[in-house]
Amino acid sequence: MNIYFAASIRGGRDDWSSYLEIVQQLRAFGNVLTDHVGDVELSAVGEDIGDQKIHDRDLGWLRDSDYLVAEVTTPSLGVGYEIGKATEWGKPVLYLYRPTEGRRLSGMIAGCSGVTLREYQTTEELHEVFEEFVGVHQPRSAVNEA
C-alpha cells in the first residue's frame, strides 16, 4: 500500500517535527512515498532538483499512491494542487488540521466533499485516525490479498 503524504514545504516549515511524526506513524500502514517531507534537513527552499522534476516526480508518486494524507494547517499552494489532483483521480483523501488561534482552514479545503477531515491537537491522537481511515478506504488490491 502506497501513501502520499503532503504538507507545506515552501509555504513554511514551522511544523516539520509534526510532519516527521506523521510520516513515522504512516509507515505502520504502508510505504510513504514522500517521507522526505518530514526530513529535518528539508528547508522552506525545498529540494534543489528543479521545479519541473519535482512536479513530474511528485505527480507520478501521487498517481501511484493508494491514499493522500495531507497536513493542511500551514497553507500551501502545492498541497492544494495535490489535493485537487487526488480528488480528480478519485483517490481517498485525509486532511489533518490542527486548529490554531487566528487561523481558519481554507473554505476550498474544508468544503470539498468526498474527503475526510480530522482535527487534532497532538500527533499522538493520529494513530487511531489513520487506522479508521485506512480501514474504511482499503484499496481493492489489499482486499483481494486478504
Image: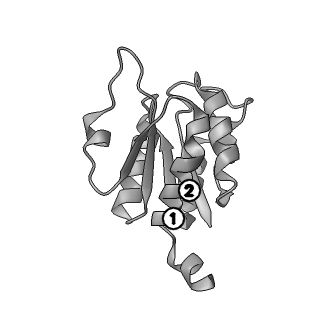
For the point 51% across and 70% down, the residue is 138
Q: Quadrant of residue 114?
A: bottom left
**Front one among 37 and 115:** 115
> Which residue bears the numbered disc 2?
131
Whole-percent x, y for residue 4 in the image: 56, 54
Residue matched to label 1:
135
Q: Is 13 displayed left or right of 106 in the figure?
A: right
Q: Amino acid at mark 1?
A: Gly
Does residue 103 appear in the picture of this structure?
A: yes
Query: In the rendered image, which quarter contains the N terminus?
Result: bottom right
Q: Residues within 10 Å of mark 2 (few under 14, many from 20)?
A: few
Residues packed near mark 1 inside 10 Å, few (<14), some (14 to 19) or many (20 plus): few
Residue type at the position of mark 2: Glu
- Residue 44, by quadrant, is top right
| Circles 1, 2 touching at the beta carbon (< 8 Å) | yes
User: Residue 94's x, y, as percent?
Assistant: 44, 50
| Local SS, label 2 | helix
Q: Residue at x 48, y 44 (%)?
A: 70
State the separation of the CA atoms marked 1 and 2: 6 Å
